[in-house]
């Protein structure tokens, strides 16, 4: 792939992330949660393996939220009218974010529990 195309591809990806952060309330909440978790991780002194699991978990949630936004915008582009299948698509994408968030809470308990003697 030529450098111009690669640069344009990265530029589009970054623009998409900026859009998600600026326009999606839940993405802002996830970013805030990420900042708080990183501060907590620094405070308790995670091991390298724990940091790796934490990074994977955080990005799992952020990716799910970005995909949810993409699904919602695509559905909105296709139809402005209520349609039960459009609702199912949006609900399924939101459900994926919920699953990622629940998984991140479980991972937080596993990672931080021993450090907090829970």
Image (cartoon, rainbow, N blue to C red):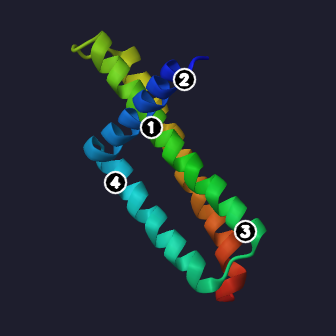
User: Which residue is tagged 2?
Assistant: 3
Q: Which mark identifies residue 75?
A: none
What secondary structure is found at the residue carrying circle 1?
helix
User: Quick check: marks 3 and 2 in contact, CB under 8 Å?
Assistant: no
Give the residue at x 51% y 40%: 64
Q: Quadrant of the N terminus?
A: top right
Q: CA distance from mark 1 to mark 4?
A: 11 Å
Earlier-in-chain disc, 1 versus 4: 4
Mark 1 closeness class: few <14, some 14–19, many ≥20 residues within 10 Å:
many
Q: Position of residue 98 (x, y in %)?
A: 50, 47
Q: Position of residue 70 (x, y in %)?
A: 41, 28
Give the residue at x 62% y 84%: 44
Earlier-in-chain disc, 3 versus 2: 2
User: Quick check: marks 3 and 1 in contact, CB under 8 Å?
Assistant: no
What secondary structure is found at the residue carrying circle 4?
helix
Residue 118 makes an appearance in the image: no
Earlier-in-chain disc, 2 versus 1: 2
Give the residue at x 57% y 50%: 59
The outermost residue toward the bottom is 117
Q: Which mark identifies residue 66?
A: 1
What secondary structure is found at the residue carrying circle 2?
helix
Query: Left of 44 or right of it: where is 16?
Result: left
Q: Quadrant of residue 83?
A: top left
Q: Position of residue 33 (x, y in %)?
A: 44, 64
Q: CA distance from mark 3 to mark 2?
A: 36 Å
User: Which residue is tagged 3?
Assistant: 50
Q: Which mark identifies residue 28?
A: 4
Q: Position of residue 45 (x, y in %)?
A: 66, 82
Q: Quadrant of residue 68?
A: top left
In the rendered image, the vertical position of residue 21 relative to residue 57, given as above or below: above
Q: Nearer the viewer, mark 4 or mark 2?
A: 2
């Amino acid at each position: 792939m030529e450098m111009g195309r690669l640069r344009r591809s990265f530029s589009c990806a970054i623009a998409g992330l900026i859009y998600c952060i600026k326009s999606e309330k839940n993405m802002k909440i996830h970013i805030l949660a990420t900042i708080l978790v990183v501060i907590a991780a620094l405070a308790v002194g995670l091991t390298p393996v724990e940091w790796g699991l934490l990074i994977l978990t955080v990005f799992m949630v952020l990716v799910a939220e970005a995909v949810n936004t993409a699904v919602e915008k695509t559905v909105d582009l296709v139809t402005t009218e209520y349609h039960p299948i459009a609702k199912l698509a949006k609900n399924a994408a939101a459900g994926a974010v919920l699953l990622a968030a629940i998984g991140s809470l479980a991972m937080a308990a596993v990672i931080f529990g021993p450090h907090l003697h829970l």
